[in-house]
Amino acid sequence: MASIFLSYAREDIAKAERIAKAIGDAGHSVWWDRELRAGQRFSSEIDRALKSADLVVVLWSSASIHSTWVQDEAAVGRDSNRLLPVLIDPVEPPLGFRQYHAVDLSRMRGARAARALSAAVEARLRGEPPPAQSAARPSLFGRFRWQWAAVGAAIILAAAVSLWLLQSRGGVTKHTVVVAANGGDMPRSQELARNITLDLGRYKTGVLGLLSVVAATDRKALNAEYRVDVGLSGGGNNWTADLSLRSHRDAGLLWASSIAREDANLVDIRQQATAALVHVLDCAGEAQSGKVKLNREALSLYLDGCAQLSDYDVSDPGEELLAIFRQLTRKAPNFAQGWAWLALLEAQSYPSVQPREWNALSRSAREHLRRAKQLGPGLPITAAAEAYLPENFLSGDKGLAIIERALANFPESTLLHASRGDFLTRVGRVSEGVKEAKAAAELDPLSPARVDNYASALAYSGRTRQAFDVLEQAEKIWPDSTVLNGARYRLDLRYGDPRNALVLLEQRGAGDARPVPLDDAWRLLLQARIAPNHANIEKALAAFRSRGKNRSGDWGYIQALGTFGRVDEAFAAMQPDEAIDALSGSPDTFFRVHMRPVYSDPRFMGVAQRLGLLNYWKETGIWPDFCREPQLPYDCGEEAAKYD
């Protein structure tokens, strides 16, 4: 007999009672807080029951997916590998729980539902996946296989989207890629290769509708265009997977990567390897589908760039990534995607470079965008690049309008959804921005950059608990991700554990979005967050004032003032015109939750006018989210009328 914890929403108590009876009739002990839910919840008793249970059965319904209690209880089961999700309504579980196979009882009744539930409980208690997902034979990865339902679904979705995009541009040519073990511990390498073949094979129509993934033993392997070699070495919880993509006919190397993990199980390696290969094979299929055929050197550059694009900071792409696409455009001057990505990366670099470099960077981005439009008009990348040009990016509505026109033609573009979210938050439409960030992450769930964007959007909108849940799940898949490491620092810096942020600060160098050498202000800000007394806060603010003596519009200083509620000083710091010019590059920062003391002051409408935001709100009639906050001490429309 096992101990089962049953988690449900109060609205589902009748269904919960029937399910509790079915589990009890199967010989198990069921704990469910029927009495507690009728009145006060006693968290200590619930915690004891959760910790002692052998299995946590969560009933997902139209009510429970919105219940923070149920999500918290489900998270305990998930994080301790004791979760059994059950659908009692035809709903999608909340983000963070979609990768787990759920027993669908929404269309079952009576004895059939009881049998299905009992079988699933018995399977999970044995450490197996639910019966519908059971593997045909044991595997090194077998006990984790149930976790891969969502990975498969994500891959299928990405493939369908990619195929639609390709078909809208023209014809489709089928290519074959073979996955084989090569090197390392051969039995384990062979097992990993088999599992990666299965994972990649979930592309029912192939990567971008172009790639059919087969095992080395498949007779189709003889005519494959590409070969993926997989080598696994190590032991215990320390593993290294070596991956490479080659031209199958001449064995020419196109791309290679090594995934080294400590304190990780094999399913982590498998998931990370699949994620890396998805993006690289996706780009290989795209490159080979167009009118311009890349030679091996150019294709290798493009694949290196694609691999990095899934894990880059859009506000600071970095010189290495820019160098790859600059070299690619020299090697393949007729490849539209190369020029488009170069233009977009240059435009996105604008906020991170010195003012003296702005003009040259803008000219370069415009010229490269012109080349991209000549070679490949209508690409989603070219629309994004145009939107991020300074004259459109700094406008309240121009960049957003460009993105929305492109989305009408490419409604499933991950890049365009992420970009629309960015532009929406710049005009204060924060909730819509979160939805777009979520859409982008769901369209490309194997990109840490998209997950970072979603987690950050959640945190800045005030949904910090959900943000950290999303980030923690992503860190399990990509523990060495550059962009996720940056997200961890930024979120801990503002909303999470300031002690952890201090450790990260020592590792990366001071700064907010990016390291700033010889800058002590951030360390002092974190110390003030740890011990928010007057003396510590004054030390931190004094450090920001000191570094800003020779410049106006220091976003770090303005945010520190917002964090500590120094509203008068914040408005004084924003008084000079040059301060507004400097702050105009990131108006979205004003709408983050730690800036509430600033935007809650009616004087903020004057700042919004100087930023060009007030005209956008008046002309469109779409006011920023904060104007609907019940605790806002002024009426946005009335205050805005003073600036007619």
Image (cartoon, rainbow, N blue to C red):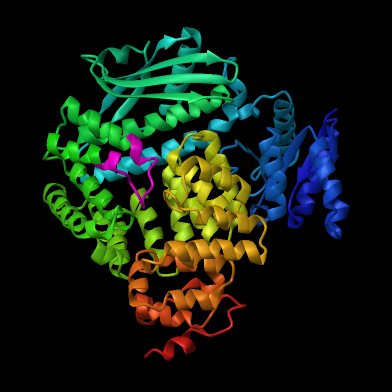
- What residue is rendered at 21% in x and 32% in y? 288
Q: Is residue 65 above or below residue 621?
A: above
Q: Is residue 316 magenta?
A: yes
Which sits in the foreground, 351 or 426?
Answer: 351
Task: Tell me how many marks there are.
Answer: 0
Residue 619 location, quadrant: bottom left
Which sits in the foreground, 276 or 606?
Answer: 606
**Does residue 319 appear in this view?**
yes
User: Residue 159: x, y in percent?
Assistant: 37, 38
User: Residue 416: x, y in percent?
Assistant: 34, 54
- What residue is rendered at 68% in x and 32% in y? 81
Q: Is residue 312 left or right of residue 91?
A: left
Q: Is residue 115 left or right of residue 38?
A: left
User: Residue 273: x, y in percent?
Assistant: 44, 27
Q: Is residue 524 left or right of residue 411?
A: right
Q: Is residue 213 left or right of residue 503?
A: left
Q: Is residue 407 above or below residue 486?
A: below
Quadrant of the rendering where the C terminus is positioned: bottom left
The magenta-colored residue range is 307-322
Q: Is residue 340 magenta?
A: no
Quadrant of the rendering where the N terminus is positioned: top right
Q: Is residue 17 above or below residue 612?
A: above
As drawn, which residue projects farthest toward the top?
186
User: Residue 39: x, y in percent?
Assistant: 86, 60
**Does residue 203 appear in this view?**
no
Q: Is residue 358 above or below residue 220?
A: below
